[in-house]
Image (cartoon, rainbow, N blue to C red):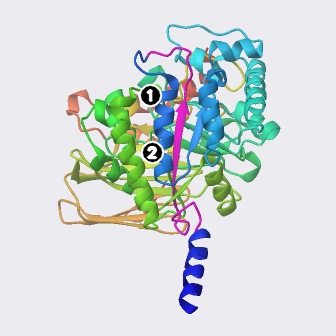
């Protein structure tokens, strides 16, 4: 009898195990699969449903949940919508790429361009604020007609703050996914947000973190195609394809699951109060080519969840957890990463609602390659339609090695004894330089300290521009006066940038 009771109790224990495994960790992973329909389809031997069926089988076999973001043209693909309805444990959200069928349903003229994925065609910002609301309303109406609910999660490579706030207030959208930092890939420039980390956006600029509860949109931003923190910081597609996306690191670099696992560790094994990474793949890629790697990614994530290293959640579930932990504004975030391809080189990324920075330990020395002060500037296309997206001038001034080739050099040569310590409101970095000197850099709430000397963010940016710490021959360096002029005219250009986006 006692043996029978033990069996009953064991079975009951198994039944109450939560489906979201790894629930005690502060690291979260979200599987997101954007689904495109027949419009602009260019895979000759593959139908829109093919990858979706296989993705569903892979995810279900690992007993995890995912978010499927649906583009408007998918509503006419009954085989896909029926499949999604049958798998009700997964979250369904809106993939807000604008296509002709969506504009037709909205009573809005489609903005045809050289390519369907040009910003003036595919993004909501390609249309007037009034037309954006019509497009959103038509999408959400059809979504509810098809699935009986409004989506809580939305995604597109860019979503403006006006549209985000409208969807939050009218439809209760809680989570939004945009693309990670990219300087020139796909002919648009989304540059300067929290690097690879979730945040609350400023109500006038999705790119910027809110600095007060009253100025935030209560929607949690996550990022698609998170970049390699060391190799992914750069000007071209050659850098942005160092990412967690299977198609990126396979096609451009012939890398494999070992590289992916290193990135997975960087983003989920941190000392941050919370960590999150999005993985997945659009159904419009060659599925036969990427199926195996996609399956290896999902299996790797599920195994880590099984060991309690991370929790796999949907987009809206993660947003709910984030809001519960951080009801006010976004916390500081830090990533300390070795170069996944060469552990001799490293980077420390630091972000809080007031600034972001990146300290690189590379072949050129120890230098700050990225430093920008978050200034509550209004995004360029907030109140008007734009044919392009360019956030490079959203910051009055910055240290930006990618945009202007300038870095703030702290030391030459390679460091030893590097240690990164994260406190409640600062990060301390200590190391020994090539001369044997002990150095200390601290990222403080609103300042940066170097060996005990504090610099304001704007002051350090100005110092970099004035002294122009570039390793160039003296005869081609700019004088301090030329650097000052560059800095001043950069401010003037930034103040008038809204007039230049059309």
The boundaries of the magenta stretch are: 17-42
Disc 1 + disc 2, Cβ < 8 Å: no
Secondary structure character of the magenta stretch overall: loop
Would residue 427 appear left or right of 374 to someone viewing this image? left
Q: Is residue 147 above or below residue 118?
A: below
The label on residue 58 is 2
Q: Which residue is at 43% across, 29% downward?
A: 183
- Please indicate, yes or no, whether residue 229 appears anywhere in the rendered image: no
Q: Whole-percent x and y of residue 231?
A: 31, 41
Quickly name the residue at label 1: 486
Give the CA distance from mark 1 to mark 2: 54 Å
Q: Which residue is at 33% across, 30% downward?
A: 289
Would residue 471 appear left or right of 283 to someone viewing this image? left
Check residue 27 for magenta coloring: yes
Q: Which of 343/290 is in front? A: 290
* Residue 285 sits in quarter: top left
Q: Which residue is at 55% across, 30% downward?
A: 35
Q: Quadrant of the N terminus?
A: bottom right
- Please indicate, yes or no, whether residue 417 appears anywhere in the rendered image: yes
* Residue 380 sits in quarter: top right
Check residue 460 for magenta coloring: no
Q: Whole-percent x and y of residue 259?
A: 29, 47
For the residues carrying marks 1 and 2, which lies nearer the camera in this image? 2
The label on residue 409 is none
């Amino acid at each position: 009898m006692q043996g029978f009771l033990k069996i009953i109790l064991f079975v009951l224990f198994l039944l109450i195990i939560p489906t979201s495994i790894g629930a005690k960790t502060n690291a979260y992973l979200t599987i997101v699969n954007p689904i495109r329909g027949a419009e602009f389809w260019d895979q000759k031997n593959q139908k829109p449903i093919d990858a979706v069926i296989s993705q569903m089988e892979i995810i279900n076999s690992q007993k995890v949940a995912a978010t499927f973001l649906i583009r408007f043209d998918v509503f006419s693909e009954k085989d896909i919508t029926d499949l999604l309805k049958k798998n009700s444990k997964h979250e369904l959200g809106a993939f807000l790429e604008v296509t002709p069928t969506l504009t037709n349903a909205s009573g809005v003229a489609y903005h045809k361009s050289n390519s369907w994925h040009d910003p003036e065609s595919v993004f909501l910002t390609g249309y007037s604020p009034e037309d954006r609301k019509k497009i959103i309303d038509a999408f959400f109406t059809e979504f509810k007609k098809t699935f009986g609910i409004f989506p809580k999660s939305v995604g597109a490579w860019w979503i403006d703050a006006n549209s985000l706030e409208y969807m939050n207030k009218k439809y209760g959208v809680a989570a939004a996914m945009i693309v990670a930092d990219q300087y020139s890939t796909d002919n648009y420039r989304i540059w300067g947000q929290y690097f690879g980390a979730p945040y609350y956006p400023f109500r006038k600029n999705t790119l910027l973190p809110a600095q007060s509860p009253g100025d935030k949109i209560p929607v949690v931003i996550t990022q698609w195609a998170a970049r390699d923190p060391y190799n992914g910081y750069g000007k071209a597609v050659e850098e942005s394809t160092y990412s967690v996306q299977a198609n990126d690191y396979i096609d451009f670099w012939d890398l494999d699951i070992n590289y992916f696992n290193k990135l997975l560790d960087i983003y989920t094994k941190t000392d941050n109060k919370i960590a999150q990474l999005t993985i997945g793949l659009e159904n419009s890629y060659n599925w036969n080519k990427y199926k195996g790697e996609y399956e290896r990614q999902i299996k790797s994530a599920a195994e880590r969840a099984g060991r309690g290293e991370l929790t796999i959640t949907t987009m809206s579930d993660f947003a709910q957890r984030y809001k519960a932990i951080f009801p006010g504004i976004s916390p500081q975030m830090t990533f300390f990463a070795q170069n996944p391809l060469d552990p001799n080189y490293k980077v420390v990324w630091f972000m809080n609602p007031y600034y972001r920075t990146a300290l690189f330990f590379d072949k050129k020395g120890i230098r700050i390659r990225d430093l920008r002060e978050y200034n509550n500037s209004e995004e360029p296309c907030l109140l008007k339609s734009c044919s392009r997206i360019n956030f490079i001038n959203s910051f009055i001034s910055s240290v930006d090695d990618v945009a202007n080739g300038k870095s703030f050099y702290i030391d030459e040569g390679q460091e030893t004894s590097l240690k990164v310590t994260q406190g409640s409101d600062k990060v301390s970095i200590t190391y020994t330089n090539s001369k044997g000197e002990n150095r200390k850099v601290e990222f403080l709430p609103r300042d940066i300290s170097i060996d005990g000397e504090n610099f304001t963010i704007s002051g350090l940016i100005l110092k970099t521009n004035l002294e122009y710490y570039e390793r160039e021959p003296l005869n081609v360096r700019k004088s301090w006066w030329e650097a000052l002029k560059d800095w001043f005219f950069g401010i003037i250009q930034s103040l008038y940038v809204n007039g230049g986006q059309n």
